[in-house]
Amino acid sequence: MVIFRKGVTRVFYSFVLSFWILLAPTSGIVGLYFSLITRNATAQGGGPTPEIKAIIQSLSPEERANFFLLSRQERRAFINKRLPQRHKPGGAGGVYGNERQKGFRLFSTNDGGQTWTMNFSPVESMSTRGGVDPEAFLGSDGKVWIYYFGSNNTKGDPARNQPDDTWRILLAKSNDQGATFVEKGISYQERRGLTDPFVLQLRNGSYRMYISRGASVFSAFSNDGIKFTVENGTRVQEGKGGVPGALLLEDGSTIIFVCGRAGIYSSISKDGLEFDDFQLVLEAPDGKMICDPSPEKIGKGSYVMAYKEKPRDVKGPRQDYVKIATSKDGLEWQKREGVVGSGSVPSLLVLSERHWKIYVSGPPPHAGRRRH
């Protein structure tokens, strides 16, 4: 009879737990998970990693219900299977001795952003000591290209200081739909600080690269998307916002998005060169900041944007998270609930209506600290 009671209790507990998971907010579910699985680690001072949080938050209510009915060992296996694994030398990411493989953290979805998988996208033959501020793009050859700010400064702010006083935007190309890249060379360089390139293909097939310089934006032009030449003037005046993203709208005008103190702002230009009259389109939550807009068109009447959210009082990228917003016209935007994962300066690449990739600045997800 005791065995029967235990069985009934287990079934009743599973039923109540499943029902609660279907209704509970994501934060409560993540908290329950850690009380069930990572209690010992938390008690010893080690908390849940952002990668594990992102996995739990990406599950649908039904998947969460099934997840919590697994045994503790099965839950651990479920999480471990979805965490990016350390790779051996020659693989796709890791730290070997004092040398960290160069590249970008990668999130992928095949269901329009409902669930995400995480990996690492290495860049072979990178000519600088590191690469940040990725900008993924579907090139004219049908391959995935990625532009990035190549930095030789490993201490301090790379936007302000480079050892040779040269700031470079590099280009790498992929032969496997954006899983791995090989650097091809310099797309743009100058002897003044710059960051955060964003490339827009124009209707005539040429390319414009919007580039951040502090809280302002300038641009460069290219006929082939490979070599860019600076354009005269400033696209966004100093103090109005930096870290740009942009879209071509249905009527042929260009909308640019920049970061400001209250959130992400936008302005529309007929020629893509003169922007003014900025409007707040995504407001930062209380105590947080949002930045790094990366908008893309999915199809007619459908747009999506990746952006970064972080606590306002935290310096550095250690608590940066990637989030998603959607729009029907590219003008008004709505935030989606939940997070994609941890990382900074997201670059969204739309390969099809439901197949997206997001590249972010950051080391391989499970890379340990370097030993000195």
Image (spheres, rainbow, N blue to C red):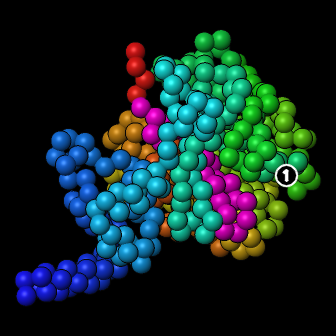
Total labels drawn: 1
Q: Is residue 25 magenta?
A: no
Residue 116 falls left or right of residue 285: right
Quadrant hosting residue 216: top right
Position of 85 relative to 148 (above/below): below
Quadrant in the picture for the N terminus: bottom left
Rate crowding at label 1 as few (under 14), some (14 to 19) or many (20 or more) other CA atoms within 10 Å: few
Position of 8 relative to 208 (above/below): below
Give the residue at the far left of this rendering.
2
Residue 297, image x and y in percent? 71, 63
Residue 115, image x and y in percent? 52, 65
Quadrant hosting residue 244: top right
Foreground pick, 32 / 344: 32
Residue 150 falls left or right of residue 264: right
Residue 358, image x and y in percent? 60, 52
Residue at left offset 35%, top offset 80%: 22
Stretch in magenta: 345-368
Q: Which amino acid does the dot numbered 1 rest on? A: Gly
Residue 161 seen by the camera: yes
Q: Which residue is mark 1?
A: 142
Q: Secondary structure at mark 1?
A: loop
Residue at left offset 53%, top offset 51%: 118
Foreground pick, 174 / 3: 3
Residue 214, image x and y in percent? 57, 33
